[in-house]
Amino acid sequence: MKTIALVIASFIAFSGAVHAADATAPVKEIMDATRSNWADNSGDWSDIFDASRLTRLYSKDFVAKYQAAAQFPAVDDDGISPFDYDVIVNGQDACPLEDLTMAAAPAVNGTAEVTVRFKKSACSEAPDAKDYTTVRFEVIEEGGTSVIDDVVTENIETQGRDSLKATMALIAKGQ
């Protein structure tokens, strides 16, 4: 009986480790695109919400909220994005991203938090240019695949956190 309990406990621990490793996959793709977008030699802008990424990397709930918000496009070149800023760097301007790190926490209640830190203004002369930006991706499993369910950024003004899903819900309400 002890052997069965040990095997089950080992399986649960192993499954959690696999899930944590898989949780970084969609985040890595989004961060690679974001890093490329802000690189000095960046060519075309890579939309982290284009149709192929939206259906592959994000949860069904996130996609529904994005599509509802997209009915109210922000002023931009293509007229389809509900945002007039980069939701990852949390601004309209950034330098090439530096010192990027990514760490996944074990899943809690089916959600793994992947924390990404980077310097977004290192090329600037501003007093806070060397400060780190922290973005938290909430990753869940749908259909056996890890997908991003929310993107949470730090709000410097309120010293709180801003959920992208909550922001999209407000945009969809016309706010």
Image (spheres, helix red, strand yellow):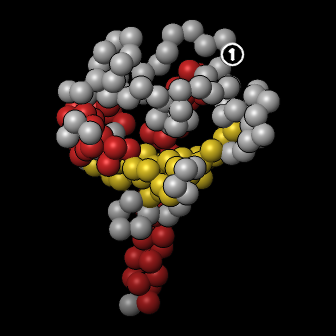
Closer to the camera in the image, 63 or 129: 129
Instruction: Identify the image quadrant of the N terminus.
Output: bottom left
Inspect the image, locate mark 1, and give the three-letter code of the amino acid beneath it: Asp
Number of callouts: 1
From this viewpoint, is residue 146 visible?
no
From this viewpoint, is residue 110 visible?
yes
SS state under label 1 = loop
Closer to the camera in the image, 162 or 38: 162
> Measured from the top left, where is residue 137 in percent x and y?
46, 48
**Residue designated by label 1:** 40
- Identity of the residue drawn at 48% across and 30% down: 86
> Measured from the top left, where is residue 161 in percent x and y?
48, 55
Closer to the camera in the image, 69 or 150: 69
Outermost residue toward the bottom?
1
- Identity of the residue drawn at 25% across and 44% down: 169
> Measured from the top left, where is residue 123 in percent x and y?
76, 27
